[in-house]
Each structure stands twice: as structure tokens, then as C-alpha cells.
């Protein structure tokens, strides 16, 4: 059979379910998720296989109105991820409806030459009459090649979407080995796993005022790996939140991240975390490079 391979840019508003969908299509976790908006900061690739077709999914940060340099870099990464893709997949939270930021996004997408598909996510918890109105409205605005209604969390509709994406990919050799599921380096993956734990465990206590930088990633002779990371926060009060009473919170964050990294890497992980107060960490060019973002003026 003829091999196919192509790129799908997954774009949408924050918290539409882009990373959850990418993980579902790949069949395992390649991108971090949380109930908080703007969890994804950088552009990551997940690699899905459907028969003889390799689908390279570009999981982009949510597109929103940027206020800070970090915001601008995230939005630039999102639109950059769509550049030259074989398909742009716009994913919309079906519960949220047609909001102004979605209409702006659709206006921008209409001008792009890439083929587009519309994905309405979270349909299992959306009201049916509102869902149908949303689908009709977005189809009139975007005029996509196809529309899919799915639940990335439960998996409903994901198989049909995957088959359609595979069919849309051009003929050509695969870009990645069959067993590779992501383009993320192990250093970046380690930082993302720890950052996910910050989101899950701190929730509203520490919104977006933190970053995780993997300072060293060392293979030990016994086959295990030693990872040293710093958690950057802007103020001493935020450091206290991350540490928790008697260091209990950071110990829990480290334990959960260590367990997940051990499963993902298939080896024993020695993870060492420390918290550093750096008032303007989001103005550090080196950190942008480390987390996979371009410096945006």
C-alpha cells in the first residue's frame, strides 16, 4: 500500500481541548492537559498512525488576545504552527458557543489557503439545540471541508476524525520512525510534566506566574536518569505557595512528576526540584529558547 504523511495544525481558543484531542489521536499522552486555559505554551508535535498513514499533529497554544511578551510568543507559535500545514483543524468548545474570539479566529482562518476542518469538542456535555446552531453558524462563516462532532475526553467521534485526517494526507514517505510519538526532547518533556503538576495541584493559587526549566538531564550508569529542575516564580509569596507547609506541596509535586516521568521514559527517575524567585522571568530570552518559544518583540 502507498504511504501517506502530512501535517495537521490543531488550533483553537484556550481550553478548547486541543492537547486532549492530540493525545487521543496519538493513542498516548504527548501533551500536558489541565482544566486551566492556556496550559500549552509551546508548539509540540504528536505523531499518529492510521494504517499506512502518518499524521503529524501540531498542538499549538490557544489563540487569545495577548497582553504580555509571553502571551505574544504563545500566539505567534500558534499561528506559526498553522503555516503550510496540509490541514488546519479548528477545534471549538461546543459548550462555550460562538464567542467574539472565535469569530475573530475564523476571520483570520478564512484568509488562509490551507484546507480547513471544523471540530466541535465536548459535544457530550453541550445542549443539542445550541450545538446544531453553533455548527450551522460556524459552517457558514468558515466553509470548512468537513465538520466533526466529538468528545476528546471520552473518545466519541475520534476514530472517524482520525480516518478523515488520514485520508486528507498527501502521498509520501513517513517523516518519523514508526515508534516515535512526539518531537519533544526529553528535557522539554520533563519540564512539561512538572508544569502540569503545578497546574493540577495549585489550580487557582498560582495561575500563570510560574515556569519550569530543566537545568540538567543526566543518564546514570545504572540506566536511570537524574533530572534537576528549577521552578521560577515572580514573588516570594508564590514561592511559599509552591513549597507548601514544611515543604509538603513541592514534595507532592515532585513525587507525582517523578512517577509519571518514570512511566513515560520507561526507567527510574531521580527528580530534584527547587524554587527560585525571579521577578521578570518572562523577560528572559534564554528561558524562551529552553521552553521552545521564539522571542517576540
Image: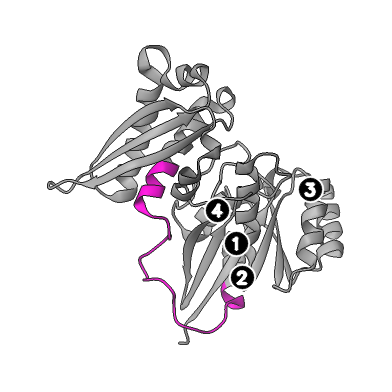
Q: CA distance from mark 1 to mark 2?
A: 8 Å
| Residue 72 seen in the current view | yes
Residue 267 place in picture, x, y as percent: 24, 47
Q: Earlier in the sequence, mark 3 or mark 4?
A: 3
Q: Earlier in the sequence, mark 1 or mark 3?
A: 1
Q: Quadrant of the N terminus?
A: bottom left
Within 10 Å of disc 2 (Cα), the crowding (few <14, some 14-19, many 20+) is many
Residue 212 sits above or below residue 234 on the image = below
- The foreground one among 258 and 236 is 236
The main secondary structure of the magenta stretch is: loop
**Magenta run includes residue 175:** yes
Label 1–label 4 contact, CB within 8 A: no
- What residue would you read off at disc 2? 85
Q: Earlier in the sequence, mark 2 or mark 4?
A: 2
- Furthest-top residue in this view: 246
Q: CA distance from mark 1 to mark 4?
A: 12 Å
Q: Which residues are magenta?
A: 166-192
**Mark seen at residue 81:** 1
Q: Earlier in the sequence, mark 3 or mark 2?
A: 2
**Image point (62%, 72%), residue name:** 84
- What residue would you read off at disc 4? 294
- The foreground one among 125 and 202 is 202
Residue 30 sits above or below residue 193 on the image = below
**Mark seen at residue 101:** 3
Label 1–label 2 contact, CB within 8 A: yes
Within 10 Å of disc 1 (Cα), the crowding (few <14, some 14-19, many 20+) is many
Horizontal side, residue 233 vs residue 247: left or right: right
Amino acid at each position: 500500500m502507498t504511504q501517506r504523511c502530512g501535517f495537521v495544525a490543531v488550533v483553537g481558543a484556550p481550553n478548547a481541548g486541543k492537547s486532549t484531542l492530540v493525545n487521543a489521536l496519538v493513542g498516548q499522552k504527548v501533551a500536558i492537559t489541565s482544566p486551566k486555559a492556556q496550559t500549552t505554551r509551546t508548539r509540540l508535535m504528536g505523531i499518529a498512525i492510521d494504517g499506512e498513514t502518518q499524521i503529524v499533529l501540531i498542538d499549538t497554544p490557544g489563540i487569545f488576545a495577548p497582553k504580555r511578551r509571553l502571551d505574544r510568543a504563545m500566539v505567534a507559535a500558534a499561528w506559526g504552527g498553522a503555516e503550510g500545514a496540509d490541514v488546519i483543524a479548528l477545534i471549538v468548545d461546543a459548550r462555550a458557543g460562538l464567542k467574539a474570539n472565535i469569530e475573530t479566529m475564523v476571520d483570520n482562518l478564512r484568509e488562509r489557503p490551507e484546507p480547513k476542518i471544523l471540530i466541535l469538542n465536548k459535544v457530550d456535555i453541550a445542549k443539542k439545540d445550541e450545538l446544531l446552531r453553533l455548527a450551522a453558524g460556524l459552517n457558514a462563516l468558515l466553509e470548512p471541508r468537513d465538520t466533526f462532532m466529538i468528545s476528546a475526553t471520552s473518545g466519541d467521534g475520534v476514530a472517524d476524525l482520525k480516518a478523515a485526517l488520514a485520508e486528507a494526507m498527501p502521498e509520501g514517505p513517513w517523516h518519523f520512525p514508526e515508534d516515535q510519538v512526539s518531537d519533544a526532547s526529553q528535557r522539554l518533556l520533563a519540564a512539561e510534566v512538572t508544569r502540569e503538576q503545578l497546574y493540577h495541584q495549585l489550580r487557582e493559587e498560582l495561575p500563570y506566574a510560574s515556569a519550569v526549566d530543566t537545568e540538567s538531564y543526566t543518564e546514570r550508569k545504572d540506566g536511570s536518569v537524574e533530572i534537576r529542575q528549577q521552578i521560577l516564580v515572580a514573588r516570594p509569596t508564590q514561592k511559599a505557595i509552591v513549597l507548601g507547609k514544611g515543604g509538603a506541596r513541592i514534595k507532592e509535586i515532585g513525587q507525582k512528576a517523578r512517577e509519571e516521568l518514570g512511566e513515560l521514559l520507561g526507567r527510574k527517575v531521580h527528580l530534584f526540584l527547587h524554587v527560585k524567585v525571579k521577578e521578570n522571568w518572562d523577560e528572559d530570552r534564554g528561558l524562551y529558547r529552553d521552553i521552545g518559544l521564539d522571542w517576540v518583540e
